[in-house]
Amino acid sequence: MNTYIRNYSKNELIEDTGRISWTSPSNIALIKYWGKYGHQLPCNTSISFTLNESKTTMDFSWSSKDTPSDEIVLDFYFENKKNQLFEDKIRAFLEKNRELFPMLKFLNLEIESTNSFPHSAGIASSASSMSALALGLCSIENQAFDLDICEADLIQKATYVARLASGSASRSVFPEVASWGENTLTSIKSSDELAAPVEGVHEVFRTYRDSIVIVDGGEKAVSSRAGHALMEAHPYRELRFKRANELVETLYNILKSGDTKSFCDLVETEALELHGLMMNSSPSFILMRPNTLAVIEKIREFRKESGLDLCFTLDAGPNVHILYPQSIEEEVQKFLSSEIKPLAQNGLIIHDRVGQGPERFL
Ligand code: PMV
């Protein structure tokens, strides 16, 4: 067990009641995590941009239980309404991982959660919500009990806990660019258990914009859990994990050098590879919609004509993330309004950018 996971008793409780609040962003993977082993550990290293606008805010309050008990007392509200489904999921997660938080014996918890992005946008909220949850729980523990865990250890525990809740959430606790997974590169300090910030990234990538074209805001056709399971018996399994780890090295060199052209090539290839893996899984899935391809073709045409370095990436769904540096924002915005908006569901494009990571308010 990690050293920042502490054991403590009710005697160390110094705040009987209290409130705290965290906002935590979503992230978009450039090299994708797709396939896991053991206790939520990744089969390859992934790298992502932390976003700025697409985020979850969680308000937490706690009070001391009259009598310590093993029962997890939790009330969960989503967008101002009691949400039994989410509450049950979080309770099940806490029950499974109760050794991480001895405080659950002594405290009643209430959580209110809201997302900055619309429900129907089809944006995966697990990264933002599970990182916010992890940060909140770690902060409550530190504040309510006399633990004196330093900021760096708190963040480490948060990335560890977030990972157990949703792998990609482990990267959301860090600003700008984060990695998760073991790697031989000395600048990639993440492990399979803990994500870490990627250092030495060129200024141009720290200004990147991500315009998310909502092609279809419906439910995901394949859940992450089912998606990762598809890699277990995938015919290209070993090749994929080896290649993804090599791509991490190539991407890291690009991120350091500021080479936005090579970035376009690598990021697009990787996005299509994720979808290719799904297409030849058993069962097979095609997660792109006709307008996903139409948007991709428009991006490639516009890039060729204009010489501007914008590119796309995809999550495990039909929506298209258009990535570009701030310096070409004006030209790209014009292109988006005239060529891309008509292809988006209800004309919805969410303008996001690389952000500074979670923030604590209370
Ligand atoms: O964190 P999960 O289990 O929802 O998996 C995320 C998978 C992808 O979004 C497709 C890729 C990634 O690395 O974020």
Image (cartoon, rainbow, N blue to C red):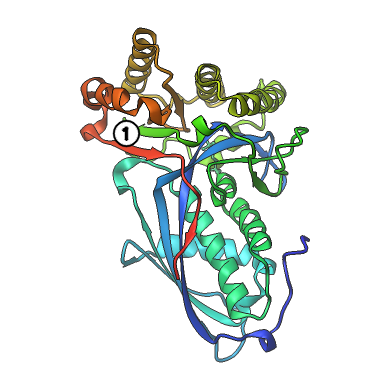
Residue type at the position of mark 1: Ile
Position of residue 103 relative to residue 173, above or below, is: below
Determine if residue 191 is in view. yes
Query: How many labels were placed on the picture?
Result: 1
Q: Please name the residue shown 22% across and 32% down the image.
A: 347
Outermost residue to the top: 305
Between 139 and 200, the residue placed more toward the observer is: 200
Q: Please name the residue shown 65% across and 70% down the image.
A: 101
Q: Please name the residue shown 78% across and 63% down the image.
A: 3
Q: Would you call the spot at circle 1 few (<14 residues within 10 Å), some (14-19), or many (20 or more)?
A: many
Badge 1 marks a residue whose secondary structure is loop
**Residue 217 rendering spot, x and y as whole percentages:** 32, 38
**Residue 171 rendering spot, x and y as whole percentages:** 58, 46
Position of residue 315 relative to residue 173, above or below, is: above
**Residue 87 rendering spot, x and y as whole percentages:** 45, 65
User: Which of the 4 image quarters holds residue 10?
Assistant: bottom right
User: Which of the 4 image quarters holds residue 153?
Assistant: bottom right
Q: Quadrant of the N terminus?
A: bottom right
Position of residue 258 relative to residue 75, above or below, is: above
Determine if residue 33 is in view. no
- Residue 10 appears left or right of 348: right
The residue tagged 1 is 214
Which quarter of the frame holds ligand 1? top right
